[in-house]
Amino acid sequence: MTDTEVKAPKIEFPQTDYPVKVICDTGAGNKDKIIEIVKKYATINDTRVDERQSSNGKYTTIQLHIVATDQDQLYNINSFLRATGFVHMVL
C-alpha cells in the first residue's frame, strides 16, 4: 500500500451491540421517528437508547445500539435517517 492509498476500516459482522449516534434538530416526535426508521432495518437494544440535548437546546443527540448485520444495512439506516430533513449527522 502506498502513502496515498486509504484503506476502509474493516468491521466484522454481525455486531450485536453496534452504536449509532444521530444528531438532529430538537423537536417533538423526532426520537420516535428515528427509532421507527432504524427498526425497519435493524434490531434495537431498547435498554440502550440515550437522548441528550445541546446546551442551547437546538440539537438533540440520540444514541442507539443495534444488531448490525452488514455494510448495506448501515448505509440504508444512514441514508433514510438523513432523508428526514431533521437529521444532520449519523455516526
Image (spheres, rainbow, N blue to C red):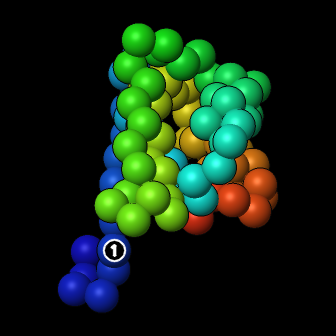
Residue 4, placed above or below residue 75: below
Q: Nearer the viewer, residue 59 or 37?
A: 59
Residue 47 location, quadrant = top left
Q: Where is the N terminus found, in terms of image quarters?
A: bottom left
What residue is drawn where x is 75% and y is 49%?
A: 80
Query: Residue pushed farthest front?
Result: 56
Q: Secondary structure at mark 1?
A: loop
For the residue marked with disc 1, what is the amino acid?
Val
Q: Is residue 74 visible?
A: yes
Residue at the spot of label 1: 6
Q: Measured from the top left, where is residue 31 in percent x and y?
A: 61, 36
91 relative to 51, above or below: below
Extreme-bottom residue of the structure: 4
User: Mark 1 packing: few (<14 Cα in 10 Å), some, or many (20+)?
Assistant: few
Q: From the viewer's perspective, is 37 left or right of 2? A: right
As drawn, 58 above or below 84: below
Q: Which of 31 and 80 lies nearest the eye of the viewer?
A: 31
On the image, the x and y values in percent for residue 81 come to: 69, 49
| Near-viewer residue (89 or 69) | 89
Residue 37 found in image quarter = top right
Residue 56 spot, x, y in % from top left:
39, 65
Number of marks in picture:
1
Question: What residue sits 38% from the left and 19% below the top?
Answer: 48
